[in-house]
Image (cartoon, rainbow, N blue to C red):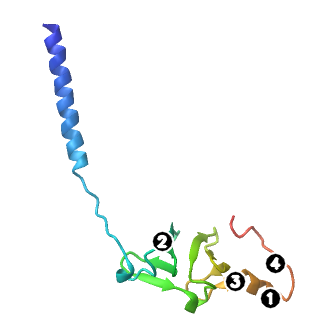
Amino acid sequence: MEYRHEHGRIFFVLIVIFCISRAVAGERLPLKTYTTADGLAHNIINKIVHDSRGFLWFCTADGLSRFEGYAFTNYGTQHGLPQPGVNDLLETREGDYWVATSGGLVRFNPTGRPESVAARARAHKGEPLRWERPPFG
């Protein structure tokens, strides 16, 4: 008699687990695919970065795309990037952006023009660059 009782409990537990797993498996999260038709700079994405301001940055084969939740803003060679291929983006603790392109590393200001490390060196007239903290710290 006790064997049947245990068998019934196991069956009940299996039914509950099955029902819960079906309910969880049935939940679908919204998923949207973005392409150049939606404003993305290029369909080949090298890296996606989420910054402290809430933007998503897409490092693409043809520039940098910033996504504000509804639309893209694109930055490319016409905005001062040395090459169109963007490989990586890093935001420092101070909120500066550093962009690694196929043509070199630039400090990037989305409201201004990117500034290459070489241009900064020229601006200091041969003085060595001095960082209060490492730029990538």
- The kind of secondary structure element at disc 3 is strand
In-image side of 83 versus 135 (left or right): left
Q: Earlier in the sequence, mark 4 or mark 2?
A: 2
Q: Position of residue 7 (x, y in %)?
A: 17, 17
Instruction: Say few, some or many: other residues with alpha carbon within 10 Å of mark 1 (under 14 / 14 to 19 / 20 or more).
Output: few
Marks 2/1: CA distance? 32 Å
Look at the numbered discs 3 and 4 and tell me whether their residues touch, using CB distance below 8 Å. Answer: no
Q: Which mark is residue 122?
A: 1
In the image shown, does 12 or 48 lie closer to the viewer? 48
Q: Nearer the viewer, mark 3 or mark 2?
A: 2
In-image side of 45 versus 132 (left or right): left
Marks 4/2: CA distance? 32 Å
Q: Position of residue 83 (x, y in %)?
A: 61, 84
Residue located farthest toward the bottom when viewing the structure as drawn: 78
Look at the numbered discs 1 and 4 and tell me whether their residues touch, using CB distance below 8 Å. Answer: no
- The kind of secondary structure element at disc 1 is helix
| Residue tagged 2 | 45
Kind of residue at badge 2: Ile
Kind of residue at badge 1: Arg
Q: Position of residue 27 (x, y in %)?
A: 24, 53
Instruction: Say few, some or many: other residues with alpha carbon within 10 Å of mark 4 (under 14 / 14 to 19 / 20 or more).
Output: few
| Residue occupying image coordinates x 63% and y 77% | 102
| Residue tagged 4 | 129
